[in-house]
Image (spheres, rainbow, N blue to C red):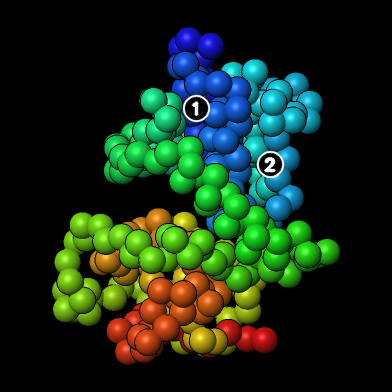
């Protein structure tokens, strides 16, 4: 399997698994790790993996293909392998570990190492919590507006990243083109889920947190878990003692219409 690559492709993201000297079992662990990430972000376990000929693939069959196309309910996948994706991940197996690197618009933004043991623990924790919840929902669409919870070990890490500035700098930024203050439906909020246009719901209040992406101590990726969703439970996982409205008040644009 020297130099072979399997790419998991969606419309705005590509995950490239370098086979190198990894075993099939290790490659499937990496594939399950990627699928878990998609499930967390989309809050659905209804994921379909297909070949270029639109044949449904098992996990074992996926690693034998150069390109695997990942489909989510209600989300378009144009099966484009030529255009650069907004987000690209690479996974390089090396001596019991995986070097995971993230690129955004062609620029490397993150580089971390994770062991297969750590991944298996994350998969087990996810399957017992969020995964079990998703499987219990006959109509998964009901839960898609709720931001996914994270495994407890990720919460305990409380990793910080370098940000544009502190809380004071964030508060002092001017707000341009602020949306009209009104009541918004979940459907309206869910449309604002891309970097540069991010709304979220916290305790029934709707916030435009687009500006806060550059100032969030936990990084953009964590904040995007609540993009276009109700982040109340996720927020309380990390900040149950914090008055979120106090520091987001300037970006408060309305209330959720139930």
User: Which of the two residues, 205 or 90, is positioned nearer the viewer here?
Assistant: 90
For image coordinates 40% across by 33% down, the residue present is 97
The quadrant where residue 235 appears: bottom left
The Cα atoms of the two marked residues, 2 and 1, are separated by 18 Å
- Residue 194 vertical placement versus 104 (above, below): below
Q: Using the rendered view, name the quadrant where residue 24 is placed.
A: top right
Mark number, residue 17: 1
Q: Residues within 10 Å of mark 2 (few under 14, many from 20)?
A: some
Q: Residue furthest top?
A: 2
Q: Is residue 105 left or right of residue 23?
A: left
Residue beneath disc 2: 71
Q: Position of residue 60 (x, y in %)?
A: 69, 26
Residue at (58, 49) in percent of width and height: 123
Q: How many marks?
A: 2
Q: Quick one: SS at disc 2?
A: strand
> In front: 101, or 186?
101
Which badge, 2 or 1, comes first in the chain's sequence? 1
* Of the pair 139 and 248, the residue shown nearer to us: 139
For the C terminus, give its image quadrant.
bottom right
Q: Which mark is residue 214?
A: none
Give the residue displayed 39% in from the left and 36% down from the top. 100
Mark 1: secondary structure = strand
Residue 121: percent from left, percent from top: 53, 50
Q: In this view of the protein, can residue 210 be seen by the observer?
A: yes
Relative to residue 16, is residue 53 drawn left or right? Answer: right
Residue 62 in the image: above or below residue 245: above
Q: Is residue 171 left or right of residue 226?
A: left
């Amino acid at each position: 399997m020297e130099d072979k690559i399997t790419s998991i492709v969606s419309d705005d993201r590509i995950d490239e698994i370098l086979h190198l000297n990894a075993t099939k079992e290790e490659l499937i662990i990496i594939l399950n790790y990627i699928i878990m990430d998609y499930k967390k972000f989309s809050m659905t376990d209804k994921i379909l993996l297909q070949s270029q000929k639109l044949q449904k693939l098992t996990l074992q069959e996926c690693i034998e293909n150069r390109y695997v196309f990942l489909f989510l309910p209600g989300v378009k996948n144009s099966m484009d392998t030529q255009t650069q994706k907004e987000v690209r991940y690479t996974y390089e197996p090396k001596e019991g570990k995986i070097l995971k690197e993230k690129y955004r618009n062609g620029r490397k933004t993150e580089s971390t190492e994770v062991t297969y043991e750590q991944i298996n623990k994350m998969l087990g924790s996810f399957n017992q919590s969020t995964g079990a919840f998703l499987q219990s929902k006959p109509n998964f669409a009901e839960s898609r507006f709720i931001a996914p919870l994270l495994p407890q070990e990720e919460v305990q890490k409380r990793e910080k990243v370098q940000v544009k500035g502190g809380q004071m700098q964030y508060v002092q930024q001017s707000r341009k083109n602020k949306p009209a203050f009104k009541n918004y439906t979940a459907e309206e909020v869910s449309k604002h889920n891309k970097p540069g246009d991010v709304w979220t719901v916290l305790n029934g209040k709707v916030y435009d947190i687009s500006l806060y992406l550059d100032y969030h101590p936990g990084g953009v990726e964590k904040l995007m878990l609540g993009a276009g969703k109700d982040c109340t439970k996720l927020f309380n996982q990390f900040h149950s003692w914090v008055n979120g409205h106090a520091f987001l008040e300037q970006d408060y644009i309305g209330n959720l219409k139930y």
